Image (cartoon, rainbow, N blue to C red):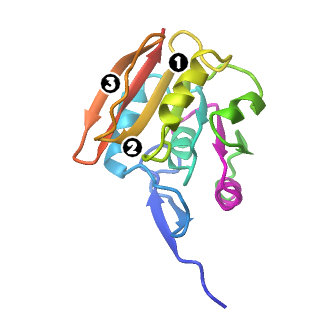
């Protein structure tokens, strides 16, 4: 019987600080690095408490679980991979995270199947070699999920060029050799 290998990431702040989360090595997930998550949640610190969040390309769940750990009121996790969904449900159960939903949907078309309410923070970390970031931002702009002030975290390859046009404004941006990440604000 073959054993599924796992990788781990750790929660870096909040009530689950130091807890390790596992995800399968054969998973399509590419978890956000600790240093980047720390920067992101320093940016979000003034607004994370009691926020409603959407983790639209959930993968390992690191961003949404970190948000819950730091006091988010609710996180909706979305991913299209069944193994990812199963594993996310398991992780949330182990953490006793009752204020979360996990949905198996493909983005951005899956937006039509999410119960409609506005989110305060949306995490977008799609596969780097796709146009899913732009397509999802465009779909969100005309959806009931954003309101004035909604923040959207994005992560993409540092070589990926995309235009940031109204109704989005660039709020924060950082780059490493391989990754560009930042916050957009809906106006």
**Position above or below: 89 against 176:** below
Mark 1 and mark 2: Cα distance apart in space: 19 Å
- Magenta range: 70-93
Residue 77 in the image: x percent, y percent? 65, 42
Residue 10 in the image: x percent, y percent? 45, 57
Badges 1 and 2: C-beta atoms under 8 Å apart? no
Examine the structure image and report whether residue 101 is included in the region drawn in magenta.
no
Residue 27 in the image: x percent, y percent? 56, 63
Query: What residue appears at the point 60 percent right and 17 percent down from the top-left corner?
Result: 146
Question: Hey, which quadrant is residue 185 in on the image?
Answer: top left
Q: Is residue 168 left or right of residue 43?
A: right
The residue labelled by disc 2 is 37
Q: Residues within 10 Å of mark 2 (few under 14, many from 20)?
A: some
Residue 172, numbered circle: 3
Mark 3 and mark 2: Cα distance apart in space: 14 Å
Q: Residues within 10 Å of mark 3 (few under 14, many from 20)?
A: few
Question: Hey, which quadrant is residue 45 in on the image?
Answer: top left
Nearest to N terminus: mark 3 or mark 2: 2
Examine the structure image and report whether residue 83 is included in the region drawn in magenta.
yes
């Amino acid at each position: 019987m073959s054993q599924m290998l796992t990788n781990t990431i750790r929660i870096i702040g909040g009530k689950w600080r130091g807890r390790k989360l596992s995800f399968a090595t054969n998973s399509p997930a590419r978890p956000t690095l600790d240093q980047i998550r720390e920067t992101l949640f320093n940016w979000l610190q003034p607004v994370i408490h009691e926020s409603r969040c959407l983790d639209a390309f959930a993968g390992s769940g690191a961003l949404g679980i970190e948000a819950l750990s730091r006091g988010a009121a609710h996180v909706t996790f979305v991913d299209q991979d069944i193994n990812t969904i199963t594993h996310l449900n398991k992780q949330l159960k182990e953490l006793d995270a009752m204020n979360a939903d996990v949905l198996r949907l493909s983005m951005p078309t899956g937006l039509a199947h999410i119960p409609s309410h506005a989110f305060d923070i949306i995490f977008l970390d799609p596969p780097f070699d796709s146009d899913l970031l732009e397509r999802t931002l465009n779909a969100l702009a005309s959806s009931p999920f954003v309101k004035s002030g909604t923040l959207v975290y994005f992560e993409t390859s540092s070589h990926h060029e995309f235009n940031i046009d109204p109704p989005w404004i660039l709020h924060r941006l950082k780059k490493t050799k391989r990754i560009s990440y930042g916050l957009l604000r809906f106006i």
